[in-house]
Amino acid sequence: MRASGTALQACTEAHGRSASLPHITHRVSRLRKKLSVPPRNGPRCKKGHISSDPPSLSSPINSLPDHFSPLFLPQKKRSPVSLPRGFGGGREWKEAREGSIEGEGVGVSGYGIWPMSGEKPPVEICKGVNGLDKVVLREVRGSSAEVYLYGGHVTSWKNDHSEELLFLSTKAIFKPPKAIRGGIPICFPQFGSHGNLEQHGFARNRLWSIDTDPPPFPTVSSNKAFIDLIFKPSEDDFKIWPHSYEFRLRITLGPGGDLMLTSRIRNTDGKPFSFTFAYHTYFSVSDISEVRVEGLETLDYLDNLKAKERFTEQGDAITFESEVDKIYLGTPSKIAILDHEKKRTFVLRKDGLPDAVVWNPWEKKAKSMADFGDDEYKHMLCLPQWAAGSSKGASRMKIIMLYDLQAHSFVGCLASKLKLSFGGKKERRRDILYDNIKAVFKSKAHLLIKSLRLNLVRGVDGIQIFEALTLALLFKARNNGRLGPGLPVAEAAVGGKKP
Ligand SMILES: O=P(O)(O)OC[C@H]1O[C@H](O)[C@H](O)[C@@H](O)[C@@H]1O
């Protein structure tokens, strides 16, 4: 809840004035409304549905904003029918499913008990592109995900405004043996070229099945939309890679619209083997040059574009202006992708996946890829999380991805657009503006300008008007080492007049 607290605080302290309690309460409730967060106290807990299944990771997600919390899922009337393992969406779904399995077209549709009022079912099996089987997961608030059995591949993840959060190429080829370009390919038993197998292994271009009898999970997912998939190697696969195993993948859409993938690999003949694995996640971004990645700064990386030479990352956060293909080593369990343009932040939490790749092919390579549009590199960022594992028994790798429409990261971030006018020479104007804004931030001690862009927008009476786009991050206050509250970029600074 800390991140949300920071955002609320940032908002309540906006415009640099102290606020009275009723004033703050009013603004907090306005912000809560905007974020679709039910009001605090009383009815919230009573009306809400308390999940018995809080996501469990080595680092708990208790610092997530309120609106990710499963506490606020509206209560639905449930029918006491049990659901076979392997399907999520609530117990009542079994009856709906059994009542309506079809041979062709929509394989499973909500009928019978679910839906109650024309609602679509939380788990639906249907046909996708080229007649390939796909599973659609839906959450009551409107978020959804789509998973192809071909590759066990998540191809779509939408928030409750139906905005797509994953990148999928318009030229993606949905035809074996080509892997689908975009979404979340599963790379196994080899990631990249770290071995003798084909690039990224073969699991991404094999047909997976629905696992109707998965071994129990440590946590129960009965209240979420989820699907269990399984991949077992064929005899031909065994010839390429002579190891016996079962690869199980659970894909869960949480009540807050968060997407969670859990992979479990079980050695089935006891002979140990090693593998590499990745969730090769393609995120959809508005404009790659406006995107920053936080959490990887100062880490060591191997540069795939320089024969895997080892370097140390410099600077505050990762930004993009050319092709990048780096393997970051020993990454933290939490990485954030800030999409400044869309005012959207992805937060990625992972477990059992120590390393992360950052890949964007940029213009030249994009043109050389048959299943990738020439300009599509501008709208995607690939951030595979990967691990090298050995399987004497079982391995488990998990990611949770969250999105936040407010432009704040786990550190906290403020973005602002100002229009300011200045006389004088062009370069000097830029300098003055920058210095002035910087001074305002510096004086607040806990704010740091992360980027500043100036665009000439129009001239009035010979005075040039600049639009200043600023992005500031909160950072640890010097005096006590704690996160400081946010302050506005403010009608900021400089005494420039707003047009
Ligand atoms: O074209 P693919 O086999 O799907 O690989 C796409 C990309 O995946 C990874 O991120 C690698 O680091 C890149 O070197 C590679 O180009």
Image: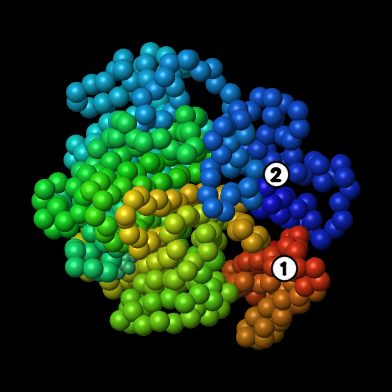
Please give left or right for residue 36 compared with residue 139 in the image: right
Q: Amino acid at mark 2?
A: Leu
Give how far across and how far down residue 47 sits, in percent.
66, 24
Instruction: Judge by depth and name the residue closer to the eye, 430 or 125.
Output: 125
Give how far across and how far down residue 422 sits, in percent.
70, 77
Q: Quadrant of the C terminus?
A: bottom right
Image: 257 above or below 195: above
Image: 344 above or below 100: below
Q: Quadrant of residue 84?
A: top left
Residue at 62% x, 83% y: name it. Answer: 426
Residue at 66% x, 72% y: name it. Answer: 449
Image: 414 above or below 126: below
Q: Secondary structure at mark 2?
A: helix
Q: Quadrant of residue 375?
A: bottom left
Q: CA distance from mark 2 to mark 1?
A: 24 Å
Q: Is mark 2 within 8 Å of ligand 1?
A: no
Q: Quadrant of residue 468?
A: bottom right
User: What label sits on residue 241 in the rendered view?
Assistant: none
Q: Secondary structure at mark 1?
A: loop
Q: Amino acid at mark 1?
A: Lys
What crowding class fits label 2: few (fewer than 14 Cα within 10 Å), some (14-19), or many (20 or more)?
A: some
Residue at 47% x, 39% y: name it. Answer: 218
Give how far across and how far down residue 1 sits, in percent.
67, 47
* Residue 269 in view, yes or no: yes
* Residue 160 in view, yes or no: no
The residue that disc 2 covers is 31
Taking the image in four quarters, ligand 1 sits in the one at bottom left
The residue that disc 1 covers is 476
Nearer the N terminus, badge 2 or badge 1?
Answer: 2
